[in-house]
């Protein structure tokens, strides 16, 4: 089944304790992205990657890191989480990198993170 | 930068039509999308429209695009309680990046 998977789905942690949220897609997609969703703010892009070893900042990258060593995986790293990073996180992938062609993004199920 | 705006909340009765509106600023948008997010789930593509189209119909869904006014709408005919969800408008603002609106919560009451 074609899908984007994220782990863990739920995580409660404490301030300053490094964590990684994994994202994997099995559709051979070039483009992958991380979003956070907060009430009243909608979806905001954290980082994105157009291909292996190519990553770029989105709208809210502060406090996050990513890597794209393999095409299928795009982990999100919080080196020193803080309470303002409590949020619902979504990973997404899409086939191409051209904005001029139809380009559906496929979303993972989300990771709910609470930082105490 | 590019911006996408939507009203935050819409409440309708079952069987009525729902119309969710969206405005965007990026005049170079080639595709515009509607995504649906059900409670506790990720976003799923509902429908999309190419920028050279005025209208697209897909069963109970009708998408209208006014490119001159940069206005997009989603009409759901015969709205059902199962349509209750958050609906996101998005435009393709370069490469594969999508700019999303804040989402419209649709509440359908019996």
Image: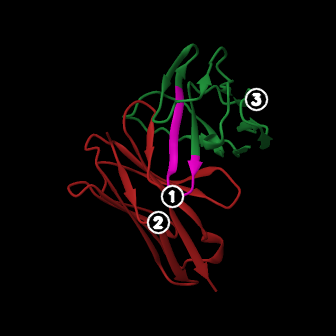
Chain colours: A green, B red
Report the magenta residues as a range. Answer: A37-48
> What chain is tagged by disc 2?
B
> What chain is tagged by disc 1?
A
Q: Camera-side residue: A81 or A26? A: A81
Judged by depth in the image, the label closer to the viewer, 1 or 3, is 3
Q: Is residue A75 left or right of residue B47?
A: right
For label 3, the residue is A17
**Residue at 53% from the left image edge and 30% from the top image edge:** A62
**Residue at 46% from the left image edge and 33% from the top image edge:** B96
Secondary structure of residue under mark 3: loop
Q: Note whether B58 is above or below A82 in the view shown.
A: below
For label 1, the residue is A40
For label 2, the residue is B8
Judged by depth in the image, the label closer to the viewer, 1 or 2, is 1
Whole-number angstrom distance, CA of label 1 to CA of label 3: 27 Å
Q: In this view, does A87 lie to the left or right of A62?
A: right
Q: Note whether A72 is above or below A13 in the view shown.
A: above
Residue B83, image quadrant: bottom right
Q: Is residue A103 visible?
A: yes
Looking at the rendered structure, whether the residues under marks 2 and 3 are on a common chain is answered as: no
State if disc 2 and disc 1 touch (CB < 8 Å): yes
Report crowding for label 2: few under 14, some 14 to 19, many 20 or more residues within 10 A (C-alpha). Answer: some
Q: Is residue B36 left or right of residue B67?
A: right
Label 1 vs 3, first from the N-terminus: 3
Judged by depth in the image, the label closer to the viewer, 2 or 3, is 3
B30 within the magenta span: no
> What chain is tagged by disc 3?
A
């Amino acid at each position: 089944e074609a899908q984007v998977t994220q782990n863990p789905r739920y995580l409660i942690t404490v301030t300053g304790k490094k964590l990684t949220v994994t994202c994997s897609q099995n559709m051979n997609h070039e483009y992958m992205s991380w979003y956070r969703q907060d009430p009243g703010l909608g979806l905001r892009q954290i980082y994105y990657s157009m291909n292996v070893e190519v990553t770029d900042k989105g709208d809210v990258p502060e406090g996050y890191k990513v890597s794209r060593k393999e095409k299928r995986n795009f982990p999100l790293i919080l080196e020193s989480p803080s309470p303002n990073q409590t949020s619902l996180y979504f990973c997404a992938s899409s086939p191409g990198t051209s904005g001029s062609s139809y380009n559906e993004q496929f979303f993972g199920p989300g990771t709910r993170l609470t930082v105490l | 930068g590019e911006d996408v705006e939507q009203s935050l909340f819409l409440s309708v009765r079952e069987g009525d039509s729902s119309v969710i509106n969206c405005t965007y600023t990026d005049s170079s948008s080639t595709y515009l999308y509607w995504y649906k997010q059900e409670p506790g789930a990720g976003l799923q593509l509902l429908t999309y429209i190419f920028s050279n189209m005025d209208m697209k119909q897909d069963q109970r869904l009708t998408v209208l695009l006014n490119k001159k006014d940069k206005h997009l709408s989603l009409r759901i005919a015969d709205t059902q309680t199962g349509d209750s969800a958050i609906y996101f408008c998005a435009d393709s603002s370069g490469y594969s990046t999508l700019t999303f609106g804040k989402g419209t919560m649709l509440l359908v009451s019996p």
